[in-house]
Amino acid sequence: MREDYIRKHFIFHGRVQGVGFRYHANYIAQRLGATGWVRNLYDGTVECEIQGTPGMIDDFLYMLDNGKYIKIEYIEQDNIALKEERCFQIKG
């Protein structure tokens, strides 16, 4: 694990379910080399943990927000502890 890596926990609000959000997030994270996971929540939001450099995470958010059908209205976010993992995945 690189020393410059951070891990963020996000909950995305808006038009984020039924629009390919999880698949788009997975594609972007893998392209950037970030690790973590993404899943839908029952209240219509999407939860995500992502680990990488601050620049990778900024790029991830920028590219997600520019998805064709995705409309992020609000993001809850926290810094969390790093985890040992190999890839980014879609949960549930």
Image (cartoon, rainbow, N blue to C red):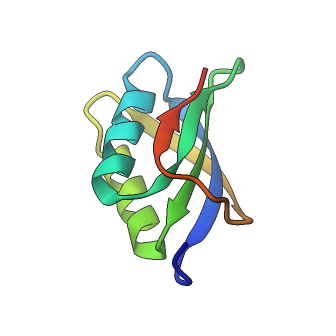
At 37% from the left edge and 45% from the top edge, which residue is drawn?
A: 64
Nearer the observer, 50 or 86? 86
When asked about the image quadrant of residue 40, the answer is top right
Residue 20 position, x and y percent, is 37, 24
Q: Residue at x 56, y 41 (%)?
A: 37
| 72 left or right of 92 in image | left
Residue 72 location in percent, x, y? 47, 40
- In depth, the one of 35 and 76 nearer the eye is 35
**Residue under the image location 45 percent in, 30 percent down:** 22
Q: Position of residue 88 (x, y in %)?
A: 47, 44
Q: Is 67 left, or right, of 47 in this rendering?
A: left
Instruction: Single out the residue that lies furthest toward the bottom.
Output: 3
Residue located 32% across and 58% down the image: 32
Residue 60, picture quadrant: bottom left
Q: Nearer the viewer, residue 17 or 90?
A: 90
Could you say which quadrant of the image residue 1 lies in? bottom right
44 vs 50: above or below: above
Q: Is residue 3 above or below residue 53?
A: below
* Left/right of residue 55 with respect to residue 2 in the rendered view: left
Quarter of the image that includes the C terminus = top right
Total marks placed? 0
Rendering coords of residue 62 (x, y %): 35, 56
